[in-house]
Amino acid sequence: MNKIKNLDDLRKMKQDLQNKIKLRERGDSPEAIVQIKVGMATSGIASGAKEVMNYLIEELEKRNIDAVVTQVGDMGYCYAEPTIEVTLPGKEPVVFGYVNIAKADEIIEKYIKNGELVEGILPANYQSID
Amino acid sequence: MSLINIKINGKELQVEEGTTILQAAKKVGIEIPTLCYMNLHDLNIEHNPGGCRICVVEVEGRRNLAPSCVTKVWEGMSVKTHTMRVLNARRTVMELILSDHPFECLTCAKNGNCDLQKLAQDLGVREIHYQGEQSTYKEDKSPAIIRDMDKCIMCRRCETMCNDVQTCGVLSGINRGFTAVVAPAFEQDLIKSPCTFCGQCVAVCPTGALTERDYTNRVIRALADPTKTVIVQTAPAVRVALGEEFGLPAGTIVTGKMVAALRRLGFDKVYDTDFAADLTIMEEGTEFLDRLSRYLNGDKNVKLPILTSCCPGWVNFFEYNFPDMRDIPSTAKSPQQMFGAIAKTYLAEKLGVKRENLVVVSVMPCLAKKYEAEREEFRVDGNPDVDFSISTRELAHLIKQTIGDIKDLPDEDFDKLMGESTGAGVIFGNTGGVIEAACRTAYEIYTGKTLEKVEFHQLRGFESVRSAVVDFDGLKLNIGIAHGLGNARKLLECIRNGECEFHAIEIMACPGGCIGGGGQPLHHGNTEILKARAAAIYKEDEGKALRKSHENPEIIKLYEEFLGKPSSEKAHHLLHTKYFDKKKRIYIEK
Amino acid sequence: MSTVKMHLLVCGGTGCVSSYSPQVAESLIKELEAHGLQDECKVVKTGCFGFCEQGPIVKVIPDNTFYTKVAPEDAKEIIEEHIIKGRKVDRLLYTDPKKQEHVPDSKHMEFYKKQIRIALRNCGFIDPENIEEAIARDAYSALGKCLTELTPQEVIDIIKKSGLRGRGGGGFPTGIKWEIAAKNASDQKYVVCNADEGDPGAFMDRSVLEGDPHSVLEAMAICGYCIGANKGLIYIRAEYPLAIKRLKIAIKQAMEYGVLGDDIFGTGFSFHIELRYGAGAFVCGEETALIHSMEGQRGEPTVKPPFPAEAGYLGKPTNVNNVETFANVPPIILKGAEWFSSIGTERSKGTKVFALAGKINNVGLIEVPMGITLREVIFEIGGGIKNGKKFKAVQTGGPSGGCLTETHLDTPIDFDNLLAAGSMMGSGGMIVMDEDDCMVSIAKFFLEFTVEESCGKCSPCRIGNKRLYEILDKITQGKGTMEDLELLRNLSEVIKDTSLCGLGQSSPNPVLSTLTNFWDEYVEHVTEKKCRAGQCTALKKYIIDEEACVGCTACARACPVNAISGERKMPHNINQDICIKCGACYEKCKFNAIFIK
Amino acid sequence: MSSIHIKLKDKDCQTIKEICESFNNDPGELINILHKAQEHFGYLPAEVQETIAQNLNISVAKVYGVVTFYSFFSMTPKGKHPISVCTGTACYVRGAEKVLEELKKELKISVGETTPDGKFSLSCLRCVGACGLAPVVMIGDKTYGRVAPEDVKKIIEEYNS
């Protein structure tokens, strides 16, 4: 057991431990950070949504972007699976279709980091699904 | 101590820091009624739990009323002691207390001598608006003390006396809320508890919850029985306190009038316990000198100090609390029991009365004497050496019922054979008195010289634990004295731990000695009364022609005619006793 | 680490535990393992979410899905539908009582919308049995800051400036209390945490101890640093086994990690904490009684002064604070006095935790900013009155408090306003009553409690409360007189004015506040022998509706005292003088012909 | 407080001695000691109190005074299935009293008593903190929430079979 010998020990330990509950802290105030919803219904899983989701979670973490990635059921765009919905703080949600790993990388680099639009946005005449 | 400026009912005054509102008010002549509060300042006993809430007063700036007995003054404090708000509160609280108190004043032992009754009158309570369930408990009748907890008002003075002062640990607050009351463990009877029957709880009880077991009825019946010869013995402390019951100032000596009254009550003979006190000195003194000389000669089997054993409360105390040390107190019986043993043998023969027709009554300042008289070892074939022991208070009641007053009675003398006493017997009533009396005799026997000055002033006083050195012609004897059982405990623990060395120790269960006994007229916490009684005892001693026990002619005659020598086989048989280990006794009803 | 993409928080508070939340957690773990998801999704047992009414609660993170009344059997569906397929299990979602709609996540629940969580910041968020989760949420950082950057006086000044007042009932300024204890020089001092929560219907302290024990331990150490004490004692009810268990674990872990014990953070400051158990005496919430109890004695209060800060535990200066008060301290140190004092009202800063209970839809534990109105608490957070009944009163402050009515609904809640309204903050019990509650009976209920819990030391409390109870009982029996109402008032005033401790000084409050706010109801009981709520059995009248009665004689045969007479096939009649109001006839009647008046 | 009388075996006295010693025979720890003793014996008969007093060198009256002050301590053994009814305010307003009455009727004992067969004992509790489930009845460690008077018979039967 690492005994905390001074305040720096505590601070370091806190840094190390933060990951453990980061998920919860992000979940507690999602409106302040990037929110990504991944369509995960049976059709989604089959079309590789799970891989995309794992990629997003890992890459966002690596690239130090505070984001909360959640999975939702069928988003109503079966034709364009896998689909993801990205909500930047203070902005309207945007839905991307046919997302694969490469597309996901592009979304992170262009849209999430710089707000540049990326190809593949689906028409906005839908209702966000919880 | 710095002085503090306060205002009470508009009056400005300065009092010392740490003074309570109650004390401060008293200084300017304002009486605040109290009930649970008790202050025995000379004995260092102050009981102020702030529980009864009768003494509440208004303090400016304070939201609620303040209990004056525990609230200390502060600079600039302004107090009002008798506003309408205060009066309403006091009266309502009193009504509440009375609503949980049986209305048995007419048959209550405390009728006319009850703090609660008096206070209810003073507060003008005429009607009790709050009626409801009353708490009821089973009555506990021990040979010495009666507990009628229906009358308990939870002032808890008894608890303080029993635990803090006497350290007997018999009583404790139990239960809580409306069912809270003071009781022995498991609400068992006192007789099954380690109670010493010292009676200090009775002495401070403001109501009829704790009273002595009254034997006057039995005494009256015996006196009315023509087949019985009824004799009486009176303890030294009775004569200096009885007068108080008849309005005489504390410390008035009423020996002669008491004797006259007893005769008028119909006692066939009126004797003096002081005579037996002298006898005690002969036996105890001889035992002491014997143990002392063997000890000085290096006998390892002898233990010192010797402890006095004439106080029955104290005997009960060490049987319960220090049974491992029960071989060090003197084996000499108490004066009451020595008197009984001699009366039912020697005297019965002299008077020509059969033992079973001779009734021995004792008048004692003490409640433990009632229990002592009932001990199995003080009986012959079931017949007790002392039949009934009544307290000073009971005697006063009896006199009031019959003769009325003692003030106009002539002074009369005790009867012969067991009525003669010396000053040494008299001072038994004060703390330090027994050991002083013993020294007077032991000195002369040990040194073979006559004392130039019979008073041993170093042994006197009110201090709770005292030690003094007495010079037996070069032999320096360390004497210890304690009064109050809590102080006795300290002294005994000190001996047990080998921390202090004494040759002899006197212990009295009650603060002040017998003059402050549990059977004396109630002093209501006024220690000036105790001091006056103590002074009267020494005055009586000074007035005696003979002041050393071994000079008592009736004692000399008793040994010559009956007992032989002190500590003789016959003396041992009649005048000595043994003690029991009561610690292991399980106080639980089977 | 980063592969964990979801957390399932399962409430481990006493309420949910007693409705089998541990089994729910177990099933969830089993299901996750069955699907090989144990590395992706973690189950965490947390402290109380506060929403006890709907327990056991499972919250899915990060999407905040709030599942209620989850049974172990539901685990399969949650994992297979929600975790794997991303489809929420609708039937387990919370249903808004007003809109009758499922609410998808906690962010949309009225219950949580107006809450600000300071004392409860970690409750329902971290695993209370894991110090690392607490440390990740800043536990012991405030202590570190105090020990290394601030002098004791500076810390006291921060607390004073924050305006924090004691949450145990009295509302005494915490900083001033600490300052007094700090100033009394002594070789030994003590910090005591009062966790003898005894108000019937209040359980906030327990929730804090169960959900976030480290916040209390840390605050006690901070207090120790301020007043110069190296020993802390937590006086906790023996009836709180879960809280005791979690405290023991927390103390052990804190010692192992070196954030409690000797030479904390290498600063030379040492602080040790022990537990002392209460044994079921409400009066021990009073600080002098609590101290006597910790000394192994009867918990009888003694007159103050001397205050514990002068002569407390074993005669040494002692600072006593309650759990919730302590739980507020670390955030104040970390976020500053200004942050704290920006919340709340002029004289009551910060938040207060309330245990919302009674005839209300959302029973549970809430933390709201001081100054919020009763209306917001009851009708928004609390979701309004159960079964669409009419709001009648809300009782705050437990047995020491009073009943407030509709007219008080828009009063901002703080220490002073509640006191002015004839109630008090107390420890934070808030019991809502509807039209079916008889206010005389409510007063009687509280007095019954006081009578049982009075220590018996002082006469007004020992006998007075008993008499109050008896008079109230008489009134509910229909035997009261108008004079009794006068006596009630006088006696109440005198008990308040003369009792020794806080218990007696406040015990008549339920009587006085109902006398003031519901005078008519008392008078009705006395003059008309009527209980409008129909609660006082003795005042009930069973009457047969002659129109509806078919004369089947079922009622007459059921009556145990033969109070019902009537010819066969003819309307029957109940003799009110004989009737013992047992209700047997009422239950037997198949024609709804018997009604209660 | 009524009590039954038992004879303590040497083993029991030894247990008490050990409990007291684990608290350094400190009278200040009396309440903790009583908790431990009650945990061990199930209740606190007079003999146990007596032995504790001897070990701590305090008066047995004091021990008894403490035992009778705190409602958690009991001098009578609890039933095999101790039943506790929460009578906290939340449970009260949701009808705990009626449930209690029903239990009394069903078991034919009053609060604080044990059925003659030693199976059930009945007591009241002040808030177990499950206010959301009010009214609450606990039997042993098992909690029954939202109990209606009609449910009582059925619940008791669970333990009678």
Image (spheres, rainbow, N blue to C red):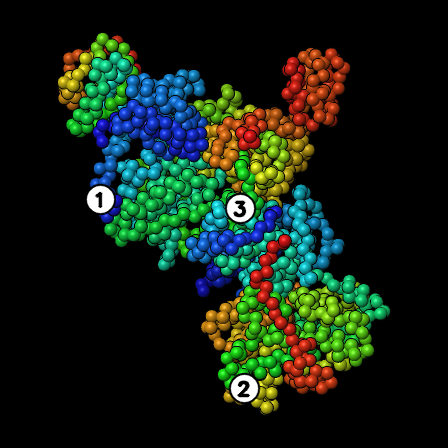
Label 3 chain ID: D
Classify 10 Å Cα crowding around label 3: few (below 14), some (14-19), many (20 and above): some
Callout 2: helix, strand or loop? strand
Residue in the image at 67% along x and 72% along y: B237
Residue pointed to by mark 2: B472
Classify 10 Å Cα crowding around label 2: few (below 14), some (14-19), many (20 and above): some
Instruction: Give the image location of residue B511, x and y in percent.
Output: 59, 68
Residue pointed to by mark 3: D43
Instruction: Give the image location of residue B196, x and y in percent.
Output: 61, 64
Residue in the image at 45% along x and 57% along y: D25
Is A23 left or right of B318, judged from the image as shown?
left
- Front-most of D61 and B101? D61
Position of residue C287 relative to residue C422, above or below, is: below
Instruction: Say whether mark 2 and mark 1 are on the same chain.
Output: no
Can residue C557 be seen here? The reply is yes
The quadrant where residue B322 appears: bottom right
Residue farthest along the right direction in this orientation: B226
**Gap between marks 2 and 3 measured at Cα:** 61 Å
Residue pointed to by mark 1: A9
**Gap between marks 1 and 2 measured at Cα:** 78 Å
